[in-house]
C-alpha cells in the first residue's frame, strides 16, 4: 500500500512559516491582488480562496472583479495601475479570460517582479535557463516541494510527465531537469499522442499525471514502487453521493495505490500546494522589493 503524500499538511507548514515571517515585520504588509473577469462560479470560488488564504498568513489579499464585457484596454490599464503601486507585491489574473481579451497580452503586461503566477515570458525564460531570481509557476513549484518534503530522490531518476501544458507540464519538466539540488532528474514529457504511452509510463520512477482525463492512468501503466503525483481534478457522476458526483484525479487512485510506493490523493494532494506556492511567491516578491528599496536608500 502506497504512502499518502499529504499536500494539505505540507502546505499548512509552508503557510505557517510565511505567517511567522510576516508577524516579525515592521511597516507595511505584503500585498496580493487577484483580478477576476466575469462571474464564473468556479473561478470566483478559486480566487476567493486564494485571497482568504493570503489574509490568514498576514498578506493583504484583494480581489478586483471586472465585468465579462470589460475591454482589453481597460484590463491592461488596471494592470498598469497595480504595477505602479509600491504596496502591491503580487498580481494575478485568473484564467481563462473572455475571447475578446488576449491572455498572452495580459500576462505579458504584468510586471515580471509582481508576476506571482510565474507565467510572464521573462519568468518562463529565467526558469528555462536555470536562473533563480524569477518566479516559478505555482503548481509545478508545489510539486517540486511535495517531492522534496517526501524525501523523494530525484538525482538521476526517470520522471515521466504526462501532459505538456504551459501551466504544468512544460515548466515542471524545466524545473526537475535543472542541475540543482533536489532536481537533476531525467525527464520525459509525454502527451495523449505519445506512442506506447502505457509502456513509457511503466518506465517511470516518478510518474506525474496532468492530462485532464479522469482516472486515465490505471495500475497496469505504473511500475511497482513508483512515486505517483496526480495533478488532475475532475468531477464525475456518482449517484451514490449526496451531490450526485465526486472528485477524482487523472489517476485511478484505488488501483494504483496498491502498486505505487507513494501517491498524492485528490483532493488534498497537489491542490493545496498551488495556493501555498502563490503565497510563497508573494512573500518572496515582498522581500526582494524591500531589499531593493533598502539598497537604493543607502546608495
Image: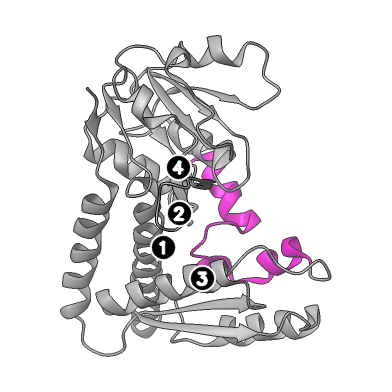
Magenta segment includes 115: yes
Crowd band around label 4 with a 10 angstrom C-alpha radius: few (<14), some (14–19), many (20+): many
163 in relation to 248, above or below: above
Residue that numbered label 2 is attached to = 138
Q: Is residue 294 left or right of residue 22?
A: right
Q: Nearer the viewer, mark 2 or mark 4?
A: 4
Element under label 1? helix
Residue that numbered label 1 is attached to = 278
- The magenta-colored residue range is 102-130
Compare marks 2 and 4 and give the one earlier in the sequence: 2
82 in relation to 253, above or below: below
Q: Which mark is residue 114?
A: 3
Q: Is residue 76 left or right of residue 28?
A: right
Residue that numbered label 4 is attached to = 248
| Residue at point 54%, 29% (across, down) | 216
User: Could you give the CA–CA distance between mark 3 and mark 4, rounded to whole angstroms?
Assistant: 33 Å
Crowd band around label 1 with a 10 angstrom C-alpha radius: few (<14), some (14–19), many (20+): many
58 in relation to 201, above or below: below
Residue 287's x, y, as percent?
33, 71
Label pair 3/1, CB-CB below 8 angstroms: no
Q: Nearer the viewer, mark 3 or mark 2?
A: 2
User: Could you give the CA–CA distance between mark 3 and mark 1, rounded to whole angstroms?
Assistant: 11 Å
Compare marks 3 and 4 and give the one earlier in the sequence: 3
Compare marks 1 and 2 and give the one earlier in the sequence: 2
| Residue at point 35%, 55% (across, down) | 272
Label pair 1/2, CB-CB below 8 angstroms: yes
Q: Is residue 103 left or right of residue 201?
A: right
User: Could you give the CA–CA distance between mark 1 and mark 4, rounded to whole angstroms?
Assistant: 23 Å
Q: Which mark is residue 90?
A: none
Amino acid at each position: 500500500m502506497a504512502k499518502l503524500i499529504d499536500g494539505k499538511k505540507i502546505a499548512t507548514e509552508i503557510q505557517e512559516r510565511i505567517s511567522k515571517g510576516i508577524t516579525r515585520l515592521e511597516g507595511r504588509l505584503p500585498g496580493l491582488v487577484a483580478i477576476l473577469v466575469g462571474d464564473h462560479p468556479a473561478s470566483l470560488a478559486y480566487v476567493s480562496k486564494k485571497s482568504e488564504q493570503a489574509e490568514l498568513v498576514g498578506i493583504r489579499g484583494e480581489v478586483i472583479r471586472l465585468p465579462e464585457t470589460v475591454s482589453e484596454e481597460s484590463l491592461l490599464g488596471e494592470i498598469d495601475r497595480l504595477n505602479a503601486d509600491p504596496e502591491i507585491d503580487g498580481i494575478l489574473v485568473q484564467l481563462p479570460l473572455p475571447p475578446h481579451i488576449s491572455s498572452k497580452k495580459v500576462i505579458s503586461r504584468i510586471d515580471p517582479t509582481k508576476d506571482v503566477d510565474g507565467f510572464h515570458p521573462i519568468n518562463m525564460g529565467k526558469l528555462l535557463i536555470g536562473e533563480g531570481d524569477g518566479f516559478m509557476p505555482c503548481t509545478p513549484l508545489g510539486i517540486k516541494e511535495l517531492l522534496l518534503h517526501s524525501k523523494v530522490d530525484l538525482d538521476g531518476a526517470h520522471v515521466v510527465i504526462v501532459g505538456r501544458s504551459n501551466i504544468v507540464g512544460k515548466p515542471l519538466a524545466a524545473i526537475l531537469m535543472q542541475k540543482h539540488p533536489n532536481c537533476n532528474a531525467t525527464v520525459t514529457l509525454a502527451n495523449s499522442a505519445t506512442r506506447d504511452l502505457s509502456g513509457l509510463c511503466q518506465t517511470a520512477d516518478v510518474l506525474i499525471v496532468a492530462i485532464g482525463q479522469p482516472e486515465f492512468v490505471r495500475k497496469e501503466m505504473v511500475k511497482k514502487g513508483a512515486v505517483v503525483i496526480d495533478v488532475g481534478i475532475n468531477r464525475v457522476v456518482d449517484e451514490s453521493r449526496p451531490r450526485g458526483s465526486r472528485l477524482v484525479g487523472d489517476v485511478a487512485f484505488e488501483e494504483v495505490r496498491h502498486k505505487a510506493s507513494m501517491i498524492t490523493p485528490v483532493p488534498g494532494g497537489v491542490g493545496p500546494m498551488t495556493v501555498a506556492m502563490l503565497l510563497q511567491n508573494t512573500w518572496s516578491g515582498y522581500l526582494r522589493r524591500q531589499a531593493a528599496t533598502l539598497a537604493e536608500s543607502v546608495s
